[in-house]
Amino acid sequence: MAICNQCGKRSNDGVVFCASCGTPIASLGGTGASAAAAPALAQSSISPNVAGLLAYLFGLIAGIVFLVLEPYKSDRFVRFHAFQSIFFTGVWIAGSVAWNILLAAVGAISGWLALIGGFLGLLLAMAGFFYWILLMYKAYKGQRYMIPVIGRIAAQQASR
């Protein structure tokens, strides 16, 4: 548990900003980020939680940009969300291509199976969309939410 130096409220582990007053929390409770990165980010116009949200909002491009820009490439929170955004978008694109190839092959065999597969693909796309919204929400709240497999890889990359 981290305690906000500004208002004294307790926050869960992994939270970067106090939910009550919005100040950066000095002890980042196991995220691996250091409080020394906070002064560098204070000079930037975008806070780390907004940078994390934007990394997801614009996918591969924003993830790469936040890994290159100076104040953000030093912050492990932003780096983690940038890497996770890049990997999530890559898996999303690869999965979509594979699903469409499979759907085309099934469509050549049976029109009904293609129709069912198209409906199932629509449901998967909607589920992925809502998961993407959840990732943006968690980043904006200052939480380090990890996607089951991708999150561990992103955390390893962000700590380098």
Image (spheres, rainbow, N blue to C red):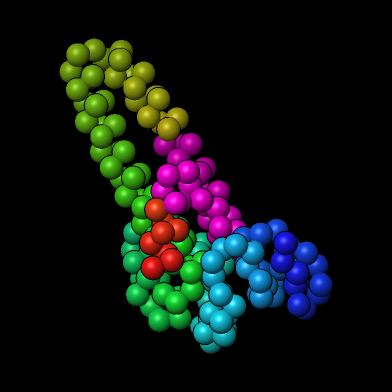
> Which quarter of the rendered picture does the C terminus lie within?
bottom left
Q: What are the residue bounds of the magenta stretch? A: 125-152
Say if 15 sits above or below 23 in the image.
above
Q: Is residue 50 visible?
A: no
> Which quarter of the rendered picture does the N terminus lie within?
bottom right
Residue 48 x/y as whole percent: 54, 71
Is residue 144 or residue 98 the one in the foreground? 144
Say if 131 sits above or below 145 in the image.
above
Residue lying farthest right? 8
The stretch drawn in magenta includes residue 131? yes
The stretch drawn in magenta includes residue 91? no
Say if 75 sits above or below 150 in the image.
below
Q: Is residue 42 visible?
A: yes
In the image, what residue occupies the spot 51% across and 62% down? 53
Magenta stretch, main secondary structure class: helix
Q: Dividing the picture into quarters, in which one does residue 91 lie?
A: top left
Q: Dividing the picture into quarters, in which one does residue 47 lie?
A: bottom right
Say if 48 sits above or below 113 in the image.
below
In the image, what residue occupies the spot 56% across and 75% down? 34
Q: Is residue 4 left or right of 47 when viewed as pictured?
A: right
Q: Is residue 91 left or right of 126 when viewed as pictured?
A: left
In the image, what residue occupies the spot 75% across and 69% down? 3
Residue 86 x/y as whole percent: 36, 57
In the image, what residue occupies the spot 29% across and 32% down? 99
Residue 7 x/y as whole percent: 81, 74
Q: Dividing the picture into quarters, in which one does residue 22 lie?
A: bottom right
